[in-house]
Amino acid sequence: MATPAPPAPITDPASLAALLAAARAELPDVRLLTEAIDRESYRLDETAYLAAGLPGAVALPSTTGEVAGLMRLASRFGVAVVPRGAGTGLSGGAAGIEGALTIALTRMDRIVEIDRGNLCVVTQPGVINAQLKAAVAAEGLFYPPDPASYETCSIGGNLGTNAGGLCCVKYGQTRDSVLGLEVVLADGSVIRTGGKNVKDVAGYSLTHLFVGSQGTLGIITEATLRLRPAPAPRQTLLAFFDSLEAAGDAVAAMTQAGLQPVTLELMDGETIRAVEDWHHLGLDTTAAAMLMVESDAPGVGAAAELDRAEAACATAGGREIVRAADAKEADWLRHARREALHALERQGTVRMEDVGVPRARVPQLLRAIERIAAAHGVRCATFGHAGDGNLHPNLIFDRDDPAAAELTHTVRDEIFRAALAMGGTVTAEHGIGAARREWLPIQRGEGAVAVMRAIKAALDPQGILNPGRVL
Amino acid sequence: MATPAPPAPITDPASLAALLAAARAELPDVRLLTEAIDRESYRLDETAYLAAGLPGAVALPSTTGEVAGLMRLASRFGVAVVPRGAGTGLSGGAAGIEGALTIALTRMDRIVEIDRGNLCVVTQPGVINAQLKAAVAAEGLFYPPDPASYETCSIGGNLGTNAGGLCCVKYGQTRDSVLGLEVVLADGSVIRTGGKNVKDVAGYSLTHLFVGSQGTLGIITEATLRLRPAPAPRQTLLAFFDSLEAAGDAVAAMTQAGLQPVTLELMDGETIRAVEDWHHLGLDTTAAAMLMVESDAPGVGAAAELDRAEAACATAGGREIVRAADAKEADWLRHARREALHALERQGTVRMEDVGVPRARVPQLLRAIERIAAAHGVRCATFGHAGDGNLHPNLIFDRDDPAAAELTHTVRDEIFRAALAMGGTVTAEHGIGAARREWLPIQRGEGAVAVMRAIKAALDPQGILNPGRVL
């Protein structure tokens, strides 16, 4: 297929001013932020190392109708739009575009319905992941997706990026929990892509396409999400290793043995020390790697699963294997794992990457990351969802040193090349966003990207939805 | 969005003759069927009640390169193409189009690789589902999707329709097991949409879009499918009820209780009697409904799960609840359930429908089906995947009586309306295909269908891929 070039979106001040004037007249209830100091808060997401533009204005709609109205105006005046959730993204997907309109969905924060009989929840996009989890837990139900930022990230952002997290290894990514969406398209029209049916093959699966498209194809204004009955309380095991490879071998052995832990996380020595330094958990700071394995199997299943995990760790050379004494200790360990990024950020600016490989290749990827970072003398701390083959190498550098920033870029590119050579991906759960665009055709091939561009052009012919992101 | 009208595909004999001449010259290894007697076998799929066209020619390629070559020629000469698997579809999606080229993928029947370490299999589309299952089972692995036709249907057809089956209630539909595809596009270019990574968010999820698109967006020539470790042997329970509603209540109670059976199937009295009549299993032919519940939970979990299922059935009024004595008896019962359609076909032409509703509404849907069929005096036997909310009402009629055929059409439309009024779907696992096209905009809305048409036009601007199907 030929690759159509997307038209350049308009971000000139006159078009935006015309849009704002029309919005004030036609959509009086939409909150608009136009002062520089207010707009500044919408410049960055959590991709701290990435430069971003200052939005020309920020709109805070409260209803689907208002989002539709804003998109009709954006379409009429040709103004570029950045859809944004809670701003916790790690690919620059919701970061500002200079002079464009950011539409933040934070005010659409209502859980519409918890449907126990059909095991699903209908929610607006601005609801925080942890709030949704808590609300359904109160009904004895479970919403699995749990990005590390779950206490601050919103469902809309989770849908936009197809967010992952700690329990994907058992329960999948965000997309796997979505039954249907309400979406506002580029021209302001509103569609629904599904409902409460767990099986439904009527037409193309637009639900799956919109999830993960990072606001480039439409703006999600409501979602119907699949729930599960609350699983048994988790049991937790920690294993410490003298080498990253030994930990990687233990992960591979658990996959081979058919274990289905709910969490199978890895931290390297740098990360262990940064977490310990902050949280004083009594972790073994001389270890080269730590695995955290959790089971939520019912009845005696959890203990049996952890016995098998313990055997795999011991065989791979685990030198210290301990189990959390109780649920409180396990919660605290999980919290510490989630805080790994912030623990590292106390030591410098962190460039957090998000590579993935087919699961059996985790030991090989760990070796490659270590080798590449060492060769360039860059500090690297790696943690991640080893059970999925998804690792986060964190390159720690001094933001005020341009050479250091440049060097992390080189290291990143080499890690990407290594992951792709193993059949891997440059992003397992954070998204291409603005940060990894040039790698999309390298990973997927020009032909596949041409298909994506054709879909983008078909749905957003003016190219106003989050231009320069993903594609 | 505006709805672009798809261009009319060309099926004139001169264009096809030019394509065939070029194929003989440029693709000498592609087997071509041009005799009417050979082409006749490719007219119908298993949608017995649906009229279909006679293909102008049938091509049987053996390689991706040959499929690509055929599509380049189809594109050059503007010839409409019907991609076809084993021909077991139930929506007319692979049935012939008069004068068009059918490309049958049956010769691409090689399992390329079973990758134990990464729990996946790479396969060509012509492999039969049961053969794939058996090959991975020999390695201690499990490929879940199991359409009732699994002994004769092909993986390519399963991918095209996002086929379901008996174990979706626990393991999802075909799409949930797909990691990546190789696809030949309308213009003959070849793309890959993923690989062996279980988490990969690089760009739009083309994998999910192509699965279920019934050959209207591209031809799948290879797939990487996710496997699971082989689960524990199943334990099986049968429960008989005096009314359909009581059985529906038991299903709803099991969902509410959070059971995760691997199979939760329903048969009504008509179906029980047809199956018993053929297979002499000793089923209770005076019952109005039967549920079949299976668990593959590990260890003591299966027996415990069936105990809870039994309690739910007893509370709902189950009058006879029995467990299969051993794996052989359970296999035989499952086989009998799979043969339900063929048992009914011994009694007349069967129009098998495929409606779905949110799970809690199964009792309501059962009531509606019974009421509608009775009101029109049409014989109806219902069975299906009650645990998913997916029921198959089978309208039994005399093919040679045009009024009877017409009447089943009326009954079908009323059942569709009833399902949609409950938030359901006109097709849960068989596909829109050729059989349910006019219902797509009614179910999804014109706006959503306009998006599908825009995607179709972007990927297949000539409209040569399976025209008149799905959209």
Image: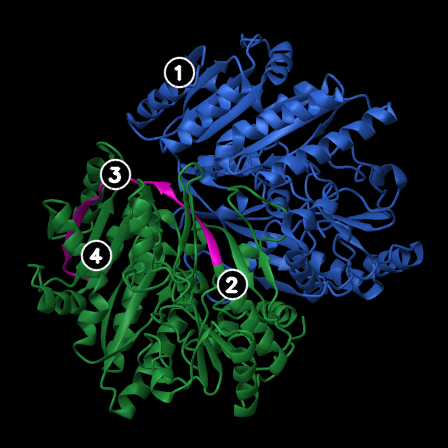
Chain colours: A green, B blue
Identify the residue at horizontal 32%, vertical 79% (top origin). Answer: A411
Please state the extent of the stretch shown in magenta in the rendering.
A222-245
Q: Are marks 3 and 2 on the same chain?
A: yes
Q: Secondary structure at mark 2?
A: helix
Chain ID of residue with mark 2: A
User: Which secondary structure, mark 3?
Assistant: loop
The amino acid type of the residue labelled 3 equals Ala
Circle 1 sits on which residue? B314
Q: Is residue A463 visible?
A: no
Provide residue A55's location: percent of width, then percent of height: 43, 84
Mark 3 — residue? A232
**CA–CA distance between discs 3 and 2?**
37 Å
- Using the image, name the chain to which the residue with label 1 belongs: B
Q: Are marks 3 and 4 on the same chain?
A: yes
Q: Is residue A83 left or right of residue A396?
A: right
Q: Residue at x 20, y 51 (%)?
A: A316
B373 within the magenta span: no
Residue holding disc 2:
A64
In space, the residues marked 1 and 3 are separated at their CA atoms by: 25 Å
Helix, strand or loop status at disc 1: helix
Disc sitting over residue A246 in the figure: 4
Q: What is the distance, in whole Å, between disc 1 and disc 2 at their CAs?
A: 46 Å
CA neighbours of label 2 inside 10 A, class few (<14), some (14 to 19), many (20+): many
Q: Nearer the viewer, mark 4 or mark 1?
A: 1
Q: Do discs 4 and 1 belong to a common subunit?
A: no
Near-viewer residue (A49 or B417): B417
Q: Pick the residue in front: B37 or A346.
A: A346
